[in-house]
C-alpha cells in the first residue's frame, strides 16, 4: 500500500496472507483451529465443557500464534522484533491479556 509515495505497512492479518502481500504485511496471527477443536473435544469428553459459554481462542492456550513475514522482518530494527516477541511471550504467559470480542 502506498500513500503519497511513502510505503505503509500493515501490522497484522488475522490469517496467513504473506504470500499475497509480501511487501507490506509484517506478521499474521494464525488461528490453529485443530488445536482449538481438540481442546474443546477434550473438555466435552471430561465433562468440563460449559454449554452456552463463548470459547475464546488465544495464544495462551495455543489456539493462535504469530507468524512473521520473513521478508519484512529482515528489514525491521532488532528492538522492534524484540518488543513484539516480548509482547507475544507476555500474552502467552497471561501477563498481558487481549480483550475478547465480548469485552469490546
Image: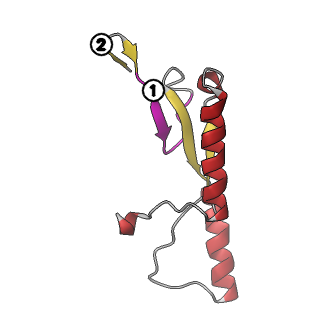
Per the image, is 13 magenta? yes
State how many labels appear: 2
Q: In the rendered image, which quarter is residue 7 located in?
A: top left
Q: Which residue is mark 2?
A: 4
Q: Is residue 61 visible?
A: no
**Spot occupied by residue 38 in the image (x, y as percentages of width and height):** 67, 68
In the image, which residues are magenta?
8-18
| Residue 56 pos. (x, y %) | 51, 67
Q: As drawn, which residue projects farthest toward the top?
A: 5
The quadrant the C terminus occupies is: bottom left
2 relative to 97 in the view: left or right: left
Who comes first in sequence, dot 1 or dot 2? 2
In magenta segment, residue 82: no
- Prevailing secondary structure class for the magenta stretch in the rendered image: loop
Look at 49% across and 85% down and name the residue there: 51
Q: Which of 95/35 is in front?
A: 95
Q: Secondary structure at mark 2?
A: loop
Front residue of 97/59: it is 97
- Whether residue 24 is visible to the viewer of this picture, yes or no, is yes
In what quadrant of the picture does the N terminus appear?
top left
Occupied quadrant, residue 75: top right
Q: Is residue 13 above or below residue 94?
A: above
Q: How is the image coloured?
A: secondary structure
Nearest the viewer among 74 and 62 is 74
Residue at the image position 35 percent from the left and 10 percent from the top: 5
List x then y, in percent, for residue 62.
Answer: 66, 60
Residue to which mark 1 is pinned: 9
Amino acid at each position: 500500500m502506498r500513500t503519497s509515495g511513502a510505503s505503509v505497512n500493515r501490522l497484522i492479518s488475522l490469517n496467513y496472507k504473506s504470500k499475497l502481500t509480501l511487501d507490506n504485511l509484517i506478521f499474521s496471527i494464525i488461528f490453529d483451529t485443530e488445536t482449538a477443536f481438540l481442546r474443546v473435544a477434550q473438555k466435552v469428553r471430561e465433562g468440563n465443557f460449559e454449554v452456552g459459554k463463548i470459547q475464546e481462542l488465544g495464544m495462551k492456550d495455543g489456539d493462535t500464534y504469530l507468524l512473521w513475514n520473513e521478508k519484512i522482518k529482515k528489514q525491521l530494527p532488532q528492538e522492534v522484533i524484540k518488543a513484539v516477541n516480548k509482547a507475544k511471550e507476555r500474552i502467552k504467559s497471561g501477563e498481558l491479556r487481549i480483550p475478547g470480542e465480548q469485552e469490546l
